[in-house]
Amino acid sequence: MTDSTSDPKQVLRFPQVQAEGLDDWRFFLMKLHARFRTGSFTKGLELVTRITEAAEAANHHPDVVLTYPQVDVDLQSHDVHGVTSRDVDLARRISEIAAELGIEAAPRDVSTLELALDVPDAAAVKPFWRAVLGYQDNQDWPEIRDPGGRNNTLWFQEAPGATGEVQQRFHLDIVVPRDVAEERVVAAVEAGGTLVSEDEVPAFWVLADPHGNKVCVCTADGREPAGQE
């Protein structure tokens, strides 16, 4: 168990987190992750309300996603970009709350999808992807993140020969509000990108980073199915 006198800013590693016996939680990508099967939106809201009360009492706040029929919770000490005793203590309290409400945890269901782009030079393309996705840098790793925490991270894997059309087997579509689209396209071009096609505007613009990797900036305008305009 975590020593209550331990440094609350000390970042814990996998063996230390495992030793805490947090059966409802899984540790990866420097966060604690849990899923609770609430079975209904109402029960989920009750759990979220109790989690909010516990978080306020601890002055330490998780990321919580309420959907039907589950609640997903991520815990990280953002000031040190890792898991600390503060997260362990709050995770344990959240598990207690779920048990009190008769809500089952589903720790084997949690996962995080990362997107990795093979590039010969991350520094050459990262400004483009940061601009086109509206993301921010992770100072500790060659990746960029959604500042709102909803979309997947994109990280850059060193691959000296990965340039041009032959290597790209999938691309990203970033869907944005219609009034944001042109701004996002301009920012991406100014960050070193190329406007490949405007043939389907305003449904989507096709752009490419300095290595030729493509991405589409998409809107709902012009993408409605036939007969539903």
Image (spheres, rainbow, N blue to C red):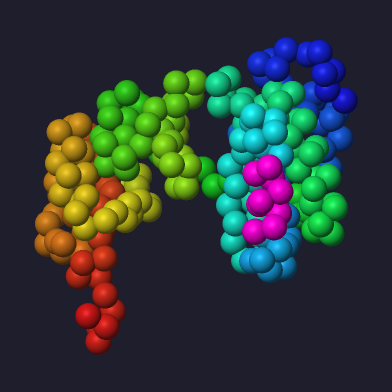
Q: Is residue 192 magenta?
A: no
Whole-percent x, y for residue 217 in the image: 25, 52
Is 27 placed left or right of 132 in the picture?
A: right
Q: Quadrant of the N terminus?
A: top right
In the rendered image, residue 52 lying in the magenta stretch gets the answer yes
Of residues 179 and 182, which is closer to you in this image? 179
Residue displayed at 25% across by 70% down: 223
Residue 177's place in the image compared with 150, above or below, is: below
**What span is colored magenta in the figure?**
45-53
Left or right: where 229 falls relative to 25: left
Picture quarter containing residue 81?
top right
At x 43% / y 31%, what residue is drawn? Answer: 143
Which of the two residues, 92 or 218, is positioned nearer the viewer here? 92
Q: Please tell me whether residue 225 is drawn above or below residue 161 in the rendered image.
A: below
Magenta: main secondary structure: helix
Residue 40 lies in quadrant: bottom right
Asked whether the viewer can see residue 157, the reply is: yes
The image shows residue 228, relative to residue 158, as above or below, that is below
Give the side of residue 214 with respect to residue 147, left or right: left
Question: Can you say whether 51 is above or below 37 in the image?
Answer: above
Viewer-nearest residue: 72 or 191:
72
- From the top left corner, tell me how far across and down residue 147 is, in percent: 42, 37
Expressed as whole percent of the image width and height from the top left, the position of residue 127 reads 28, 30
Residue 24 lies, in percent from the top left, at 80, 45
